[in-house]
């Protein structure tokens, strides 16, 4: 699976060098082209292909940002009204933010007495009051805490559906 994704990223990088604006997906019948969609006029977030000044970044970053934009546009067109968005540039996943939802990356640590406990090593989404409480181990009522590793959208899988 990783080698397939790597080949797709290499292909996208080559296409970007020659100025082609397609993202290649994968289907049972071989590669297919996913064209850039029309951006809905009510989408409150900028997409990279409409920001020429942002195209001066590396091809890898540009490819990831384009995938990020494609996910945002498709979700918005499907009626999903998120209030923010982020992309983890390490794992390539897109996270959509909603009121009262936070994403947490949990890590283990060993206490001086030898017991193992979990702590929130990374928190994304929600306002600072909520993220501070979660960081201190307090789960506020009415807040949905999602595991960052198990959540998020893989752009390749989502866009090829």
Image (cartoon, grey):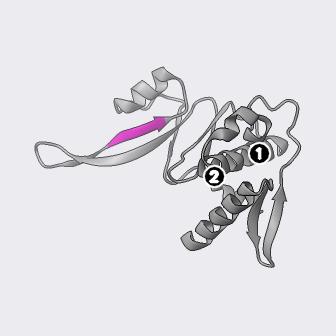
Percent coordinates x, y for residue 104 in the rendering: 46, 41
Q: Residue at x 68, y 36 (%)?
A: 54
Q: Residue at x 50, y 51 (%)?
A: 90
Q: Where is residue 161 in the image (x, y as percent from the top left)?
A: 77, 62
What residue is rendered at 79% in x and 43% in y?
A: 73
Could you say which is closer to the camera, residue 7 or residue 98? 7
Q: Mark 2 packing: few (<14 Cα in 10 Å), some, or many (20+)?
A: some
Q: Which x, y percent locates residue 77? A: 84, 43
- Which residue has dot 1 on it? 75
Residue 40: x, y in percent? Answer: 87, 36
How many angstroms separate mark 1 from mark 2 (CA)? 11 Å
Pick the front one: 23 or 70: 23
List the single residue furthest toward the bottom.
29
Magenta-colored span = 119-123
**Residue 35 drawn in magenta:** no
Quarter of the figure that contains the N terminus? bottom right
The numbered mark, 1 or 2, whose residue comes first in the sequence reads 1
Q: Which residue is drawn at 63% across and 52% down?
A: 153
Residue with the mark numbered 2: 153
For residue 10, side relative to residue 79 (left or right) = left
Q: Determine the secondary structure under disc 1.
A: helix
């Amino acid at each position: 699976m990783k080698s397939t994704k790597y080949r797709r990223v290499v292909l996208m990088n080559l296409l970007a060098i020659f100025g082609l604006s397609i993202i290649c997906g994968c289907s049972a019948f071989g590669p297919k082209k996913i064209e850039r969609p029309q951006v809905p006029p009510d989408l409150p977030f900028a997409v990279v292909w409409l920001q020429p000044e942002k195209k001066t970044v590396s091809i890898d970053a540009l490819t990831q940002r384009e995938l990020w934009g494609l996910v945002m546009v498709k979700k918005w067109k499907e009626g999903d009204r998120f209030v923010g968005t982020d992309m983890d540039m390490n794992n390539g996943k897109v996270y959509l933010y909603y009121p009262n939802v936070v994403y947490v990356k949990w890590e283990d640590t060993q206490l001086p007495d030898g017991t193992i406990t979990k702590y929130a090593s990374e928190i994304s989404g929600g306002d600072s009051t909520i993220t501070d409480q979660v960081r201190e181990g307090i789960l506020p009522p009415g807040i949905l805490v999602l595991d960052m590793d198990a959540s998020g959208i893989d752009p390749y899988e989502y866009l090829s559906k």
